[in-house]
Amino acid sequence: MLLKYIKQVEIERIIENKRSLIKDQVITEFPFTINVNGCPLVTLLCTPENLDYLALGYLESEGFIQDQDNIQSINYDQEKGTINLDLKTDNHLSMYKELNPPIFTTGCGKGTTFYKASEILKEKSINTPIFITPEKILNLVNEIQEKATLFQKTGGTHISALASTKEILLVHEDIGRHNALDKVFGECIIDGIDYTDKIIVTSGRISSEMLIKCAKRRISILISRCAATGLSIDLAQEIGITLVGFVREERINIYSHGWRIK
Amino acid sequence: MLLKYIKQVEIERIIENKRSLIKDQVITEFPFTINVNGCPLVTLLCTPENLDYLALGYLESEGFIQDQDNIQSINYDQEKGTINLDLKTDNHLSMYKELNPPIFTTGCGKGTTFYKASEILKEKSINTPIFITPEKILNLVNEIQEKATLFQKTGGTHISALASTKEILLVHEDIGRHNALDKVFGECIIDGIDYTDKIIVTSGRISSEMLIKCAKRRISILISRCAATGLSIDLAQEIGITLVGFVREERINIYSHGWRIK
């Protein structure tokens, strides 16, 4: 039996001073440990759906793997929610463990993204000439909201999507906004989807780490329904990413590289 | 000069297909390193306001300090945003560094809260007999929204508050919901405020870690404007915390220990 991502609970609800016992649906929170070469690397608190995508996306975000070629084997037990990945090299592993101090992020998800990543990323800026219209931006954001079925049931998740300039290609939801994004990239690794000419659309706020996760994948357009932090805007400007936020109803904020929007 | 928590940026805004250049305010994201006994312990990505409260609240959340008596000295440079705390004992420090695997949370903020905390907390359940009316719950949530001035300007922060059963006592905002909560507890440590008969009110979702932060402080009522995860509900039930979510307009969800609401 699969792990359940939605849990039925009995709660009391008060509406206009009337108190009643009702059944409600809440989002599951699951501690998911990623084992690498037989050792536990990290435990992510997440929604127990597509945990293989989450593991691969996370490992790519943190620099352990570049693509599927780095992976010797994957043992994923979908029912227990456990995974062990054997990597061909584990050079990165010792560096990761020695990292001091760790950086904990603003992110719903987790994150030890190496902060210096931003320095490296600035050196090879993203110039990908893809273009999108304001109308299409509004459509994509509306579309992810329609696809956010766990959010509609529980109000407790974020959603991230990979899109072309025409349509949403795949979406993932998670209690953590970083996890939802890592699941998107994880599916791309497993299914061999090229994301360098694609767009990321998310319900979550854009902090530096969300921006860096996209920059590492050479994503050129990042669209959020919510706010972006000052640091993420600075990085997007320097790296060459079109960063768009607060996409709601008929309103769009373009924070950087607006030349891709026309 | 103080670090600025709000940044002025020039952005393009599209409203109903009209594109214009405007000045906008976005929330600052600041990498804040907490140094303990001369060594960097952690870097939190946060809003650079009340960083001393954040450092103390974080250290208490993670078990480094119980109260001000554990602290030998605090060197806080408000302008540079740096802090060094000398603790009287650093027994906890080596344990912290050896913790393997780290747990990264769903949280806007950060977190390596030791997961086994929940096991320990269940053993001494919270029975504090304080009571609140549904009307007061609605009032407290409305009040924190009015006090969320950084959110009103930038749309990029969470707010947490310490309240009595009558009124909001203090509030803090941060890009991370965990940070906002740690700042509240940090102010309590510095000002010697007893929080065991108090209530926490927050704009952020309640994941297990937000719940555990409150449980460690023996908070008996936790109120959120947003969702709670299945795991946080289970923990609240077992530990004895009244967990209330989705407080909006005339609606309140009571997830656990509704006997304190009457």
Image: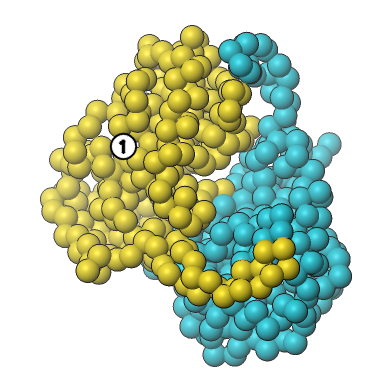
Chain colours: A cyan, B yellow
Q: Is residue A142 visible?
A: yes
Numbered disc 1: secondary structure: strand
Q: Is residue B181 left or right of residue B104?
A: left
The single residue placed furthest to the left in the displayed view is B72
- The residue depicted at 26 percent of the width and 42 percent of the height is B187
**Above/below status of B116 relative to B153:** above
Residue B44 percent across, percent down from the top left: 40, 59
- Viewer-nearest residue: A233 or A253: A253
- The residue depicted at 28 percent of the width and 53 percent of the height is B50
- Viewer-nearest residue: B85 or B256: B256
- Viewer-nearest residue: A93 or A187: A187
- The residue depicted at 43 percent of the width and 28 percent of the height is B140
- The residue depicted at 57 percent of the width and 52 percent of the height is A108
**Above/below status of B101 relative to A185:** above
The image shows a total of numbered marks equal to 1
Q: Is residue B155 left or right of residue B198?
A: right
Q: Amino acid at mark 1?
A: Leu
Residue A183 percent across, percent down from the top left: 72, 59
Residue A163 percent across, percent down from the top left: 80, 67
> Residue A136 is drawn in which quadrant?
bottom right
Q: Is residue A161 visible?
A: no
How many residues crowd around disc 1 within 10 Å: few (fewer than 14), some, or many (20 or more)? some
Position of the C terminus of chain A, as image quadrant, is bottom right
Position of the N terminus of chain A, as image quadrant, is top right
Q: Which residue is mark 1?
A: B170
Q: Is residue A126 left or right of residue B78?
A: right
Residue B9 percent across, percent down from the top left: 47, 72
Q: Is residue A145 left or right of residue A116?
A: right
Chain of the residue displaying label 1: B
**Above/below status of B134 relative to A142:** above
